[in-house]
Amino acid sequence: MKSYDFLFLISPQKPQIRPFDVFYPFSYQIETKKTILPLQYGVMSLLGSLKDEFEIGYYDLAHFKSMTKSSLKETVDTLLKKYNPRVVGLQSYTFNFNGLKETVKYIKEFNKDIITVAGGQHVSFLDTQSIKECNGNLDIVVRGEGEKIITELLQKLIKNRPIKDVKGITTDKFRNPDAPLMSEEELNKLPLPAFELIPTSEKNGQYIYFPISVSRGCVYKCLFCVNHQFWRKCVRIMDSTPAINILKYFIEIFGTRKIMLEFCDSILPINIKKFKDLVDKYTTEINFPVLFALTRANLTDDTRLELLSKLLQGIGVLSIGIENGNAEVLKLMHKPTFETSVKALINIRSHNLKATPSWLVGHPGESLKTMNENLEKIEYLFNKKLIDTLIPFIWIPLPGTPPFDEPEKYFVKIITYDWDRYDRAIFLPPYHLLEKENPKRIALSNLQIWSYYLNVISLCNKNSQNFKLKSRKKQVPLSEFLKIVNNDYYYTRFSPGKDADLNYYRDLDAFVALA
């Protein structure tokens, strides 16, 4: 039997019940047969760095179907029998870390000698804690930027050599110093992402969603974001030629009929010279509509918006992070003022671009007063036709952010460290907000934050334009919606839109396990 050096897995997501008051507004999705396979640029880049030196396999436990069984244990056993790996690597976020814990448990039950390695933001910030939480089933955490670290680590593991001098790793016995970040020159020379590892059976009939990042790091210090800390306050921007080569290879592998491209770095246009080079090459060599791009309110001058228009081509949407309407909360967030964001939206509209800002609900500093103010300002943005819709999220105290490390300082009472609850659109956030004047009193409970979130969703569904939500919703009466729910056991789990069809594992469903 052939043995693989390395099998890389995307962690599964444990089922979470989404209440009907969130699901029904998205019920227009019932009529579409479009499903989406999301790719992660960081993962594909890491695998690209390994593919020439090691025998590697890849499987997305959350989305791939070809070897997925009814239980996670059976799926893991099937994969381990097929690949017979020496080392298994796993990627996870905070919200699916519990899925990683179950996965490494099944790996060690199958063969305790398989070395398990985890990477990603959650384990980078909570490395020693994550190893302890996995009860001896997670051997190594790779912290931070993974391409060079995992290459050096595998070179030693495969040859049974000591790993004590590999920077950027943590085990239950030692925690080595951080590895240096790659320079821009090294980023530009990275091998192409390993898109060819996606089996034909997985991509057939699906839209392939690929959010590329042409930069790593951020110069801004938004309180709710982990990027500033994860990238150690360092910003590197890829040159246009390697960025375009990545996208051309993506199109070569998947074609153009069913692909969805997104530029997901919020500082994409920060270096105007590099951004212009990127757009010029993109329009000359690819010229396929980008469906979504991010920028910041302070990066919406005419020159930058004209360049963004060439990427979006009248089809895609542009998002800026407004996040809140209250001056004090925005100051605490380290975000531009609401007035600055309004001016940015006016300019975005003057370039005939679709605007879909993001909005955070339940951020530290919020109260019933700011909640009412925010709902009024969202209504204002719709009434002035400055936005097509909003992308609302619940603020979550993610590991690596100051409010997670010092919740008392930000008047946050974290009530659970069950990582399943650390999702930005799930029923009941894992915290209450406390009054600044009297921290023993609750300013906004998690139930109130949830209600606040539903109000924002309601405003979006009432006012959203250019996305056909109104007409399509009318095509699905409540009776039909309830009939589908009744006949689909796990319809109310996972994401409301149900575009990315997540795998359902019975042994990750606590409600089934207790039955």
Image (spheres, grey):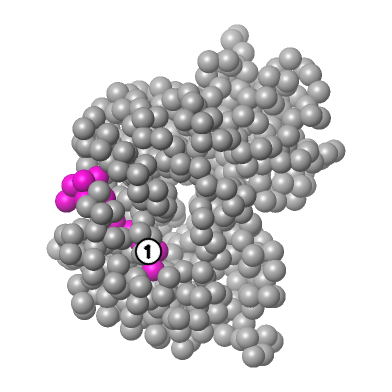
Answer yes or no: is residue 480 visible: no
Please give the residue where the numbered disc 1 appears in the rendered image: 298
**Secondary structure under the numbered disc 1 in the rendered image:** helix
Rendered location of residue 496, percent (x, y): 37, 57
Question: Which contiguous range is marked in magenta?
Answer: 308-322
Image point (41%, 75%), residue name: 337
Q: Residues within 10 Å of mark 1 (few under 14, many from 20)?
A: some
Image point (66%, 41%), residue name: 143
Q: Quadrant of the C terminus?
A: bottom right
Left or right: 468 as drawn, with respect to 371: left
Image point (75%, 24%), residue name: 113
The question of residue 64 being in magenta is answered with: no
Image point (32%, 39%), residue name: 278
In the foreground, 249 or 375: 249
In the foreground, 500 or 248: 248
Residue 357, by quadrant, is: bottom left
Left or right: 470 as drawn, with respect to 56: left
